[in-house]
Image (cartoon, grey):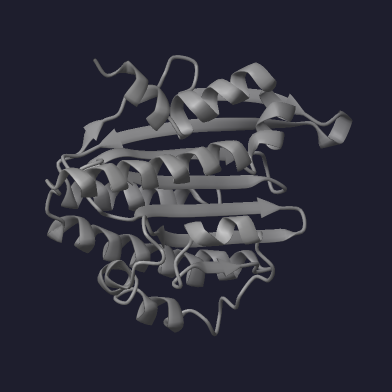
Amino acid sequence: MTLYQPFLDFAIATLQEHLDLQPYPIPEGFESKSAITGKGKRETEVLTTSYGYQSPKLRQIRAAHVQGGGALQVLNFVIFPHLNYDLPFFGADLVTLPGGHLIALDMQPLFRDDSAYQEKYTQPVLPIFETYQTHLPWGGDFPEEAQPFFSPAFLWTRPQKDEVVETHVFSAFKDYLKAYLSFVDQAEAVTDPSSLQEIEQAQRRYLNYRAEKDPARGMFTRFYGPEWTEEYIHGFLFDLERKLEMQP
């Protein structure tokens, strides 16, 4: 059992319970990929496993789970709504490196500066965020260019101990995901053409930023090479542009 497997198991079970979940196609060659890293006693297998689902309101629910022994554990779990819903994105970046853990949890807003949008999707989450501040304090500086893509309920923390991840981080992950699913449950399709255009533009902005600045790019390139990495990022992790290009 790895550090983030329980997170992934909980997420999939909860989604199956609440949604009409269907498989989301994972391009060939990306379901699972392994590489050997290090030499001698430090030699380790790094395994990356991908998961993809979809539901009537959610275009893509996907996870990348990287298992590389005690020094490297990563779970990147993101939910992208269909373009006719104004739902935020659900994003969980859970990273364990030799120096400790990097944890980012959020419902990333389409329209951060829209007060009505914030009232609808951020205000209900703030009490959850505040509950965890004692055990999961702010993780410090964050790139300024990234700030427009995160909400005031952005949980960004750097715990040192596995135990904190297994208890407080796991609990926060559960609460954020449950809150997100309640938003999904209440969400109604948008029909106004100008609003639909704004939603598509906002989704494109976010996905293009994430694809360009993906912090895992260096790691994946080191393990699996640049060609596989770029195709994985653009063809699966952040595939909206590709999907829109394919539409008639």
Residue at image position (71%, 35%) is: 218
**Quarter where residue 137 is shown:** bottom right
Q: In the rendered image of this protein, does residue 195 appear above or below residue 27?
A: below
Residue at image position (30%, 29%) is: 24
Q: Is residue 105 among the parts visible in the rendering?
A: yes
Residue at image position (48%, 79%) is: 132
Q: Residue furthest front?
A: 194
Instruction: Name the residue nearer the viewer: 158 or 193.
Output: 193
Question: In this image, 149 relative to 97: left or right?
Answer: left
Q: In the rendered image of this protein, does residue 104 appear above or below residue 136?
A: above
Q: Position of residue 183 (x, y in %)?
A: 22, 61
Q: In the rendered image of this protein, does residue 94 appear above or below residue 133?
A: above
Q: Is residue 81 among the parts visible in the rendering?
A: no
Question: In this image, 58 relative to 139: left or right?
Answer: left
Q: Residue furthest right?
A: 40
**Quarter where residue 196 is shown:** top left
Instruction: Name the residue nearer the viewer: 45 or 219.
Output: 219
Image quadrant in which the C terminus is located: top left
Instruction: Name the residue nearer the viewer: 197 or 88.
Output: 197
Q: Position of residue 70 (x, y in %)?
A: 69, 48
